[in-house]
Amino acid sequence: MHKWSRKKAQLFFFLSLSALFMLSFLLLTTHSTGTAVQVGPNGASRRSQPSFPTYVTTNFSSPLSDGNRVLEGNGYQSLTIFKAEEYNASVEFYWAPLIVESNSDDPVNHRLDHRIIRPNSLLKHASEWEKADILVFNSYLWWRSGPKIKLLWDIDDTANCEAADGVDAMKLALETWAKWVFYRMNPIKQQAFFVTMSPTHLWSREWNPAREGNCYGEMTPINDNEGYWGTGSDLDTMRMVEKIMNNLGSRVKVINITQLSEYRKDGHPSIYRKFWEAFTEEQLSNPSSYADCIHWCLPGVPDIWNELLFNFL
């Protein structure tokens, strides 16, 4: 099993008990009820959210008894909550795939031909964020799921939607989010993090010019190409996000997972996951045609993302 580590520094060893003590300490010092919310559905948040409770319940001599851990929600609701009642702490996943309000906000029925966002509206989501002590945001892949994103400025005028490229639409959404962070988030009682884009490995020729395919069959990381950067990570998007985060200053800490995850072409579920659609005989005869090279295995790469978060805390 491969595990990323820094060359010139060591992260704190991630033990579930110390993580719970850290959370409970943070929550006591802020006099809160204890909540860590992770926002966004793509590879980053949706895979890292179950990673954290897994550490809590399995990594340290059963620090949390069965009777004091509670899971509320089943993935078919906007909010899923893992509670560690002994520590007055919870880890939550809130479904807000495009940060602002959109036609993709249903956690089940979100496979749509056209993405529509309300670029200046996020109060529905923010009403949940305001309850949290530690907020972890990210958004990326959903902005790349089609040629254009429709912009609905007036909820009563659905016939006159503008259209924007994914990067431009994401910029509008993040600017609205940044205003909320600046004016509504309490930096004394709340901590906010933004996780950078989660890479994909859809074209094996990018790391091996002699091979046509994707992550299917990959068993090892990219070891011989330091600084590797695939086309699944968009530099224009990263520059746009960096500018917005710089304007927010110390109000938001950025957790950069992109470069370290770029090397992990072996970390995706490939064909070894549950697929909701039926495949044709032709597809089944060519596994790389349906291999999932976007999401991540657990345990795996998302565990490192949470170690980075833990060290920030």
Image (tube, rainbow, N blue to C red):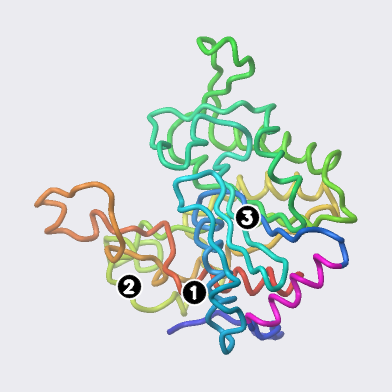
Name the residue that disc number 1 marks: 225
Question: For mark 1, does the 10 Å Cα neighbourhood hold few (<14), some (14 to 19), or many (20 or more) residues?
Answer: few
In the displayed structure, would residue 179 be above or below residue 33?
A: above
Q: Residue at x 52, y 49 (%)?
A: 41
Q: Earlier in the sequence, mark 1 or mark 3?
A: 3
Q: Position of residue 128 (x, y in %)?
A: 68, 43
Q: Secondary structure at mark 3?
A: strand
- Residue lying at the far left of the rendered structure: 281
Q: Main secondary structure of the magenta part?
A: helix
Give the label on residue 38, or none: 3
Tell me the CA gap for discs 2 and 1: 16 Å
Distance (Cα) linking label 3 and label 2: 29 Å
Q: Nearer the viewer, residue 313 or 256?
A: 313
Choose top left, top right, bottom left or bottom right for residue 307.
Answer: bottom right
Q: Secondary structure at mark 1?
A: loop
Q: Start and end of the magenta stretch?
A: 16-28
On screen, residue 281 versus residue 71, left or right, reads: left
Q: Is residue 162 left or right of residue 183?
A: left
Residue beneath disc 2: 218
User: Is 313 rendered above or below residue 127?
Assistant: below
Q: Residues within 10 Å of mark 3 (few under 14, many from 20)?
A: many
The location of residue 246, given as percent across then percent down, is 80, 50
The type of residue carrying mark 2 is Glu
Residue 151: tell me if it is visible: yes
